Image: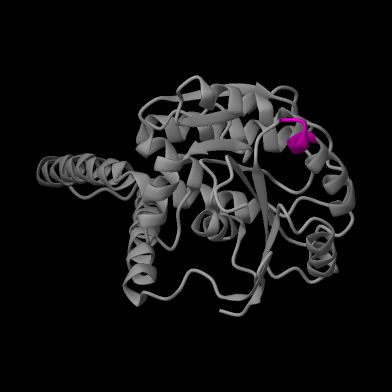
Amino acid sequence: MSNPQLTVVIPVYNEEATLKALFGRLYSALDALGKTYEIIFVNDGSRDKSAAILAEQYHVRQDVTRVILFDGNYGQHRAILAGFAHARGDCIVTLDADLQNPPEDIQTLLAEIDNGHDYVGSIRRKRHDSLWRHLASSAMNRFRERITHIRMTDQGCMMRAYSRRIINTINQCNEMHTFIPALAYSFAQNPTEVVIGHEERYAGESKYSLYSLIRLNFDLMTGFSVVPLELFSMLGMLISLGSGLLVAYLLIRRLFLGPEAEGLFTLFAITFFLLGIALFGIGILGEYIGRVYHEVRNRPRYLISAILQNDGAHNE
């Protein structure tokens, strides 16, 4: 366990109905690889019995199991970052606990790492998500690639493999809000993607609401590009130019044709449209200012209450 070849990091949040099934498939799949490995479960402040189930599993397989217990709910990406900070493997694989991505496909990612790739993304072969979520994900993928130049065919799949170098680089970053696959891609020298399976969720419901997905994409866009600010600046210049031409036209018309009484509601509509654009721009600025606000406070990303590993439980 001191220097395993592989570390698997799994964030857990209210997954008591899934964990037993996950254990049954995960350990078998990793044992079959013929590699030394460790599994780091990060309990992200679960309100159900997930923490107790993880502690029980730790006692069953202390040789390869470690459990990090948060004292609250900090989000999936911060849980993964905690796993990265404690990972000891030469290669690190992230995996969700919901069994939508089969643990047996870990060997597919490792094969690409063995071929010299330092980052291996994944594409779900046959997605079992709702239609709206599939369409929203596809649209955001295209938009994100245009403004950030980060190429990820399927940004919603968290089953990915990273080299030790990339993990060490990520561990040096202190951002409060980030999108791990995109951050890793920006550090990769030889990235690739593989197709993996995608099954229906074993039990429970997705922890990502519509708001969470929107929030995640805002983090992605504002964390890796200033294009939204540049686009709004150019839009502002075009609107200013158009407004100036409209004012000039109305002034000339008043001088030569007299004041007009018609078109009042049209002017109201134009005013409301411009106000809407202004408010949208203020929102974009607010996103960037909010990121700065979180960074300058310099608060810890997460707080760990205990770590279960083969030398006991350590409070931090």
Q: In front here: 99 or 146?
A: 99
Q: In front here: 197 or 281?
A: 197
Residue 197: quarter of image: top right
* Left or right of residue 207: residue 275: left
The C terminus sits in image quarter? bottom right
* Left or right of residue 79: residue 179: left
Residue 16: quarter of image: bottom right
Q: In front here: 248 or 195?
A: 195
Residue 15: quarter of image: bottom right
- How is colour applied across the structure in the image? one colour
Image coordinates for residue 292, horizontal then vertical, percent: 32, 66
Above-or-below relation of 31 to 9: above
* Left or right of residue 179: residue 110: right
Identity of the residue drawn at 79% across and 41% down = 26
Identity of the residue drawn at 54% across and 53% down = 87
Identity of the residue drawn at 68% across and 52% down = 208
Image coordinates for residue 283, horizontal then vertical, percent: 40, 59
* Left or right of residue 212: residue 278: left
Identity of the residue drawn at 84% across and 53% down = 19
- Residue 106 shows in the view: yes
Magenta stretch containing residue 302, yes or no?
A: no
Q: Main secondary structure of the magenta part?
A: helix
**What span is colored magenta in the figure?**
29-33
Image coordinates for residue 280, horizontal then vertical, percent: 40, 54
Above-or-below relation of 239 to 88: above
- Residue 279 shows in the view: no
Image coordinates for residue 45, horizontal then vertical, percent: 70, 70
